[in-house]
Amino acid sequence: MTHTSHAPFAADAKRILVIKHGAFGDVIQAEGALRDIRDNHPDAFIAVLTMKPYRTILARCPHVDEVIVDERAPRWRIDSMHALRTKIRARGFDMIYDLQNSKRTAFYFRWMLKSARWSGTAAGCSHPHRANEPKKIRTLDRLAGQLEDAGLTIRHTRTPDVSWLADDVRDMLTTANVRTPYIVLVPGCSARHPQKRWPHYAELARRLIAAGETIVTAPGPDEVELARTIPGICIEKTNWAELAGILKGARFVIGNDTGPSHLAAHMGVPGLALFGTHMPAERTGILTENFGAIEVDDLSALPVARVFDEVERRLAHSNSV
């Protein structure tokens, strides 16, 4: 898709705000866009407005100078809205890249920053993203199209790489008695999307262990009980950087359409995501050269044998390359 900028590229921008509230997988996928914004504005001060859970992730991002937390208070909380507006305006941003493109951020444009140059879908902004039905476009293509519409040269947006997030976790793996190579299972997902959860990870783990594989889970706080029901080694109480380190060191990752699966995919780790009909895998941006997907109409009915056979096939292929 070709995008034509209808406003001059803000090449002279000195103070830039990027808005990316979440969720986790979306923050991960925005890494390439952040890198392209930095490459196009090498001398600018770049801040990111995000939600509190993602502050520590973006604080490690090498393309960002400051992370500002948005508590996303209800709009009727006039005191909170005024405080956020005061904080944002005090920094004197002269270019905003709204990578969230939500009703909330359109409100921010109208109420807080209408005088600044603005890239996004907010009505009346200076650098509009002109794609038809952008929510139906593959996430990474949509981000690239928006930045192209703003006049940026795009090199990294479609290929994010968050390897910089990963900690060295060799001591953690040794303490947990994890033998390498190992396979990571990602059995959880957001409680708001139970339809994304494949219910047969325990049986898959048993089959993989019988085939000689070491199985690891590294659950979030809300997924510990689920992970404890899965054979293998459960590493609890990890932060984002430790989770990234565990995933980065894996031989293979198998997971639902959830943040850690996207994290693995965008560190170049081989893996397989399991999708129902909630969203085409291609549109989410999780598919890479090394990371594939199985898509079925009824995720709960996806047989363990099919997943196991696909994992074995992919492992055999990677061993032969």
Image (spheres, grey):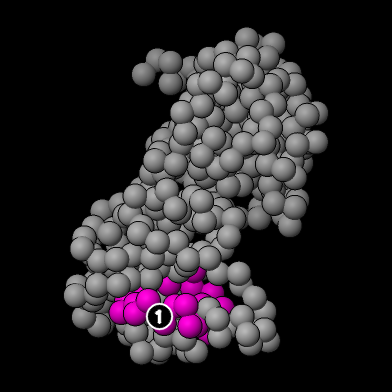
Splitting the image into 4 quarters, where does residue 96 fall? bottom left
278 left or right of 161 in image: right
Q: Residues within 10 Å of mark 1 (few under 14, many from 20)?
A: few
Residue type at numbered disc 1 = Ala
Q: Nearer the viewer, residue 197 or 312?
A: 197
Q: Nearer the viewer, residue 169 or 292?
A: 169
Q: Is residue 112 above or below residue 69?
A: below
Give yes or no for residue 92 being in the magenta stretch: yes
Q: Nearer the viewer, residue 66 or 212?
A: 66
- Mark 1 falls on what kind of element? helix
Q: Is residue 85 above or below residue 101?
A: below
**Could you tell me residue 56's position as x and y percent?**
51, 51
Residue at horizontal 67 percent and vertical 79 percent from the top: 74
Q: Which of 148 and 221 is in front in this view?
A: 221
**Could you tell me residue 303's position as x and y percent?**
73, 31
Give yes or no for residue 104 being in the magenta stretch: yes
State which quarter of the image contains the C terminus.
Answer: top left
Q: What stretch is highlighted in magenta?
A: 85-107
Splitting the image into 4 quarters, where does residue 16 fall? bottom left
Q: Name the residue under label 1.
A: 90
